[in-house]
Image (spheres, rainbow, N blue to C red):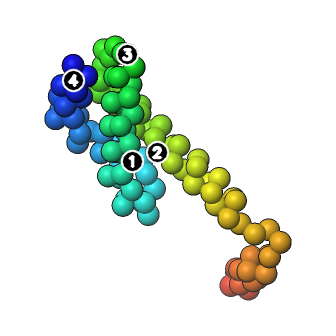
């Protein structure tokens, strides 16, 4: 039953899900739209398998799409922070000096 329901949703709402994701991602991350939209469909599938009732599938899918993009950027921010070496600040100092020099 969940499979047929999800297939119907996909046929009707796939363009909407991709559109919400595309409008929510940053301009430089357009290549992520398809992957994040697929994640939304996996989440919707899991939601249905848990036996949840859905009165408005478009609203549920749009909400899941926006939240999936937000989670992507939240986890990306954490990964960037972990990869930053705060002991080696020479490149940051050089970049800051170049900005100050260009503005002066």
Q: Nearer the viewer, residue 94 or 31?
A: 31
* Label placed on residue 5: 4
The label nearer to you, 3 versus 2, is 3
Q: Are marks 1 and 2 in contact (CB under 8 Å)?
A: yes
The label shown at residue 77 is: none
Mark 4, Cα crowd under 10 Å, few <14 / some 14-19 / many 20+, is few
Please report the residue visible at 43 percent of the width from the left and 60 percent of the height from the top: 29
Residue 103 at x, y = what percent? 70, 81
Residue 42 sits above or below residue 18 on the image: above
Going from the N terminus, do you reach mark 3 or mark 2 first? 3
Q: Residue at x 37, y 16 (%)?
A: 52
Report the residue marked by disc 2.
69
Direction from residue 16 to residue 89 in the image, left or right: right
Residue 3 against residue 92 in the figure, above or below: above
Residue annotated with mark 1: 36
- Please indicate, yes or no, whether residue 89 appears anywhere in the rendered image: yes
Residue under numbered circle 3: 52
Q: Where is the C terminus found, in terms of image quarters?
A: bottom right
- Residue at the spot 39% in from the left edge and 56% down from the top edge: 32
In this view, the mark in front (1 or 4)? 4
* Cβ atoms at labels 3 and 1 below 8 Å apart: no
User: Which marked residue is nearer to the observer: mark 1 or mark 2?
Assistant: 1
For discs 2 and 4, the disc positioned in front in the rendered view: 4
């Amino acid at each position: 039953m969940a499979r047929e329901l999800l297939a119907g949703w996909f046929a009707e709402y796939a363009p909407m899900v991709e559109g919400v994701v595309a409008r929510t991602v940053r301009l430089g991350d357009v290549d992520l739209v398809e992957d994040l939209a697929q994640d939304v469909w996996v989440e919707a599938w899991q939601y249905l398998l848990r036996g949840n009732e859905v009165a408005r599938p478009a609203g549920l899918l749009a909400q899941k799409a926006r939240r999936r993009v937000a989670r992507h950027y939240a986890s990306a921010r954490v990964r960037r922070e972990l990869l930053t070496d705060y002991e080696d600040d020479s490149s940051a100092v050089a970049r800051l000096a170049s900005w100050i020099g260009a503005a002066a």
